Image (cartoon, helix red, strand yellow):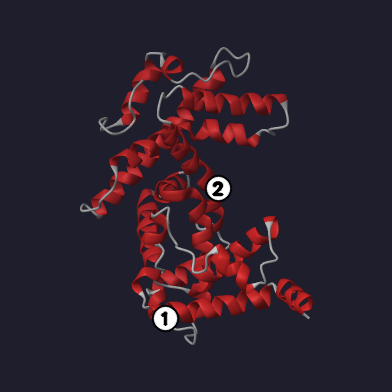
Amino acid sequence: MPRLGSRARDPSRGIRLLLSTNVIDVVFPLGRQDDDGGAESTTIYKVGLEYLSRTQSLVTGIFLRSPDLDWDISKRRLLWYAAFFKPVYEKSTRVSSNSKRGRRQESVFYQLLDALKRPKTDVQSIESILKGVDPIQETILGEVNHDAIQSAISSGVRFKDISPQNPQWEELSELRWIIYSTFQPIGTMWKESLILSLASSQNSMDDCVNQYNNLLSLVNHLHLGTILLDENKPKPLLNGSQIQTALGGQIDGRDFRRVVQASEEWQIRNVGYDLDSVDNDKRNEMEVQLVDYLVTTFAEYANRTQSLEG
């Protein structure tokens, strides 16, 4: 099994060699796709090679702009795999999973991952990169939030340096939540997913490099960089017991999950600093504000508790 990354300087070259010698389906088995003599499989391999080549070019461009960039080489290897397997993943998700063909395509994708003989954590990371591409292209790179993102990039304002009274607060608070809720489900591989999303676009390589650097700066200006790269952050402002106490201790199951999610969103929108870096007075102040928000937002629970007490 070739290693597409850690030691191979040019994984695309290795894939081209496998294609030219007609042994690629031995190394990366897709199985029989259709009764076409393997033509569909060859097409999938070639599309995967195109994604891989563009992704490599983008990474090279990023490093040329920032030669002192610190990047975990193992993550780069996982990015190569994700780029090459992208057309297989797309094919498996386009076809309805309820159909026999859909289940077969999904099975092919996971069989291909199994063929890597990589640790389960690597396989999960590759999936995370691929699953993040569509949300990033729609929410971050698409037209939906284009103006807000460009405005924030141009201003260069740091979220933690402005107050709620600042006219830019509401816009940046909203943008902070949009970016967090897009990248956070991807986990610590969000940078790799962003790179693959850019490499999969029709933009020039220079434009992709500029977009990557600008978005990375924006993430840091919004004070999200550390949070998104640490699985244990953000630390919740209120724990489960505090939430139950604030709302009368009458919530469980799905309803409690809704409250926790609302607490997380409020915290991302309003707390622009690491909780470990503030004193107890400041933390207590933020806790009171969050409790007030929860009591107002989920008044039915607070009111029910008051009724029971009455």
Element class at badge 2: helix
- Residue 8 lies, with reference to residue 226, above or below; the image says above
Q: How crowded is mark 2: few (under 14 residues within 10 Å), some or many (20 or more)?
A: few
Q: Position of residue 48 (x, y in %)?
A: 46, 31
- Residue 71 lies, with reference to residue 122, above or below; the image says below
Query: Mark 1 or mark 2, which has the lower sequence index?
Result: 2
Residue at the bottom extreme? 165
Quarter of the picture containing the C terminus is bottom right
Which residue position is annotated with label 2?
134
The residue drawn where x is 47% and y is 37% is: 124
Number of residue marks: 2
Residue at the left extreme? 68
The residue drawn where x is 55% and y is 47% is: 134
What's the CA distance linking mark 1 and mark 2?
A: 39 Å
Element class at badge 1: helix
Q: Position of residue 103 (x, y in %)?
A: 66, 27
Which residue position is annotated with label 1?
282
Q: Is residue 58 visible?
A: yes
